[in-house]
Amino acid sequence: MGVGNTDFELRTYRTAFHGEGLIPFRVVYRESDLLLLAEKDLSEEALKRLLALRQSLESYILKHPDFLSSLKPLPLDPKAPVVAQKMLRAAQKAGVGPMAAVAGAIAEELGQALLTEGLTSEIVVEN
């Protein structure tokens, strides 16, 4: 980590990443900063889905504040949004709090949504 703004780390490795025939684009919202590669630029669609994922997770956290602060696994909750359920399962496997899985869970759900909705047949999501 360099001197200065500790909230941001320059991700220079992203410039070296190429996907043959895939179009790179970024989607950024608050703490989420994703590089995606797809058959076409899906920036708008990806941002809409990112906002929806974050909204569902943030709403869940408002009702379950321990989800945000726990450093230990929490019980599985079948009523939690899918992204939160993935985080809870990952936390149990790793023996950590669910927020340790937030970036990966959001990236996975976003990529799956774009594939499932038929917007692209190939996707790479880097978080």
Image (cartoon, rainbow, N blue to C red):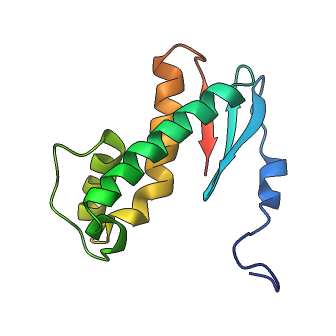
Q: Which quadrant of the figure has residue 114?
A: top right
**Residue 72's x, y, as percent?**
26, 75
Q: Nearer the viewer, residue 99 or 19?
A: 99
Q: Nearer the viewer, residue 116 or 61?
A: 61
Furthest residue in direction top, as rendered: 118
Residue at the (30%, 74%) spot, across then down: 70
Vertical arrangement, residue 102 with respect to residue 43, above or below: below
How many discs appear?
0
| Quarter placement of the N terminus | bottom right
Residue at the (36%, 44%) spot, across then down: 83
Q: Which quadrant of the figure has residue 50?
A: top right
**Residue 15's x, y, as percent?**
84, 49
Q: Which quadrant of the figure has residue 62?
A: bottom left
Q: Is residue 28 left or right of residue 52?
A: right
**Residue 89's x, y, as percent?**
25, 54
Q: Is residue 34 left or right of residue 84?
A: right
Residue at the (80%, 65%) spot, across then down: 10
